[in-house]
Structures are given as C-alpha cells and as structure tokens.
Image (spheres, helix red, strand yellow):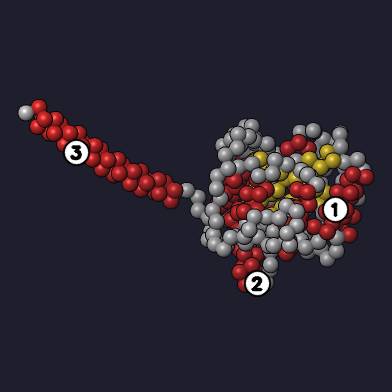
Amino acid sequence: MLAKILRMSLVAVTAAALAGTLVLVVTVIRDGTTSATSADSAPRFDPVEATVPATGGATGSPPPATSGPVSPTPSPDPRTSRPGSVDRPGATRPGSRPQVVDHGPRSGNLVALTFDADMTDAMLGNLRNGRARSYANLRIVELLERQEIPATFFLTGKWVERYPELTRRLAGNPRFELANHTYGHHAFTRNCHGLPTLPAARLTEDVARTFRVIEPYGGRQTRYFRFPGLCHDAAALDALAPLGVTVVDGDVISGDPFAKSWRPIVKAVLSTVRPGSVVVLHVTEENAAMTDEALPHILAGLRDRGLRPAVLSEVLAGG
C-alpha cells in the first residue's frame, strides 16, 4: 500500500514538473514576441549596404566591410548618459534659443579640428549608381588614430546609416567626439549653397532624429549641432530651442569641399588659425578628395605655431 502511494506521488510530481516546463516554454515564447514587438518600434535604419572602402592593409584599417545592411549595436559607456542630459558637452536648457559659437577662448594653445560627414539622397544615389566610390575618407581617420589626434565629427544621420561600422569605430575612440549635422544635409534656410531646403515644420524633428540615430553607438556623445552650409537665421535657431543644443559654426573655414589641390586648404587653415579656433573640414572623400593630403601639412603647421588639437568640448571650455 505504501509503495502504491509513493508511485502515485511520484507521478503527480512528474506531471507538475512537466506542467511547469510547458508554462515556462509558453512564457519564453510570449516574452520573445513582446521583445520583437518592442524592437520593431525602435528607430529604423535604411537598408543601405554598409560598405567601407579598402585601404590596402594600412595601420588602423577598418573592420571588414559587410555585404548587407548593418544596424548599430548599442555600446554601453559609463561616460554616456541619455540624450540632452546636462552633463553632455554642448547641452543647454531646452526651450531657449541656442547660442551660436565660432571659437573658444583665445587664451592657451588649443584648437578644435572638426570634420563634417555629409550625406544626401543625391550622394546615396551616386554610390548606388557607381558615380562615387566613397563618402568616407578612411585615410583621415587612420592618420588621426595613428598620431593620436583628438577630433570632433559632425555626423549626418544618413552618413551614419550608410557607414555604421566606421561610425562605431569613431565612437570607440576616446579621442573623438560625435556631434549632429542634421539627418540628410538639407538647408534650414533658403539660398544656402544650392542645398534643398527642409520645410519649417520638419526642422526640429530632423535634428532630433539624428540624435536618435547616433545615440546607440555610445562613445563621447555631445549636444553640439552644425547647420549645413553654416546657414541659419532666427527661425532656424528657434526650431532647435526644444532640443537643448549649442550651435557650432567655426572661425576657420578650410574650403576643402571640391578643392582640386591640398595647398589652398592648408593655406586657408594656417593663415587664419588662432588659439581657440574651430577648424571646419570634411571627411566626405568624394566631395573633399584633397583633405587627407592637406591634413598632415595642417598638423605640422599647428605644431610649428605651438597649437595643439583638442576635442571641441575642451576647446570651448578653454582647456
């Protein structure tokens, strides 16, 4: 009789264990479904092939290019807090018209090398049709890495989506800062160097969207913003008021877009650079093909003048 009771108890326990397993499986499936739904509501990335031009195995060469669309993997970083928090460089009180800065204090010996990463629909079309090879100048990045030069990159959202691995590489370098250069490099005013103009109702969301695109990459995130073509007016600045940003123009305009030689770029920079200067350069290879050739001469000229490159936040803070 006792043996029969024990056998019945064992069957009950086994059934209960199996029932628990079934419940657990259902729970996992439901959780997976919920997670998939949540992921689907996150910011999307255009399905553009993430190609990174080869560099012949030079020092600091990029990760191998992928053959399909790549979405960024979040990079947790204790230095990185939520967008717009007051401890981000360039963060200002939301609701007020942002200030526009051209340079930092003229004391000391620091200068900021800033690189714009433009990307428009037309540029993406050039890549797809083979009219352009690359809008990501890896020789610039490699030189900065090799010489351990601090720099700040103003990224368009479409450039980030086109070059996610290179963006991840920039974010992973503690000497680089990331800043905002709009989503698709549309002008915020009329008659801005021939750029298409974004409707006024879309200005705020365009910049907010770009912060969301850059955010998952971690690294040294900022709340600095640069207008395409440096074109802005009161209405454009008011559109940025809800976002708590600082607008950065620059006092040294290199003129590197579409330059045919590196020498005019070097002359434009070294003839006007001063302590506290913010130098405007471009990392968009096809549209600024001479920048990588000019950069070594610029760095040498800065050293000769006793000037030291630093990230934008350090320059604007006066070191």
Task: In the displayed orientation, state which residue is furthest to the left.
Answer: 1
- In the rendered image, the quadrant that contains the C terminus is top right
Along the horizontal axis of the image, is 288 left or right of 7? right
Q: Quadrant of the N terminus?
A: top left
Local SS, label 1: helix
Residue at 65 percent of width and 45 percent of height: 171
Label 2, label 3: how far apart the Cα atoms are:
64 Å
The image quadrant that residue 315 belongs to is top right
| Relative horizontal placement of residue 98, taking residue 42 as reference (left or right) | right
**Count of number-bearing discs:** 3
- Residue at numbered disc 1: 296
What x and y, as percent, mark residue 26?
Answer: 29, 44
Whether tag 2 and tag 3 are in contact, CB under 8 A, the answer is: no
Give me the residue at 55% from left, 56% from top: 70
Residue indicated by mark 3: 15
Q: Mark yes or no: residue 251 visible.
A: yes
Q: Earlier in the sequence, mark 2 or mark 1?
A: 2
Task: State if disc 1 and disc 3 touch (CB < 8 Å).
Answer: no
What element does badge 2 sit on? loop
Element type at mark 3:
helix
- Asked if the residues shown at circle 2 and circle 1 are in contact, with their CB atoms under 8 angstroms apart, the answer is no
- Using the image, determine if residue 113 lies above or below residue 131: above
Q: Position of residue 97 (x, y in %)?
A: 65, 39
Residues at marks 3 and 1, CA–CA distance in whole angstroms: 74 Å
Q: Which residue is mark 2?
A: 130
In the image, is residue 204 above or below residue 76?
A: below
- The kind of residue tagged 2 is Gly
Is 31 left, or right, of 113 in this rendering?
left
Amino acid type, label 3 = Ala
Residue 206: x and y, percent? 58, 51
Who comes first in sequence, dot 2 or dot 3? 3
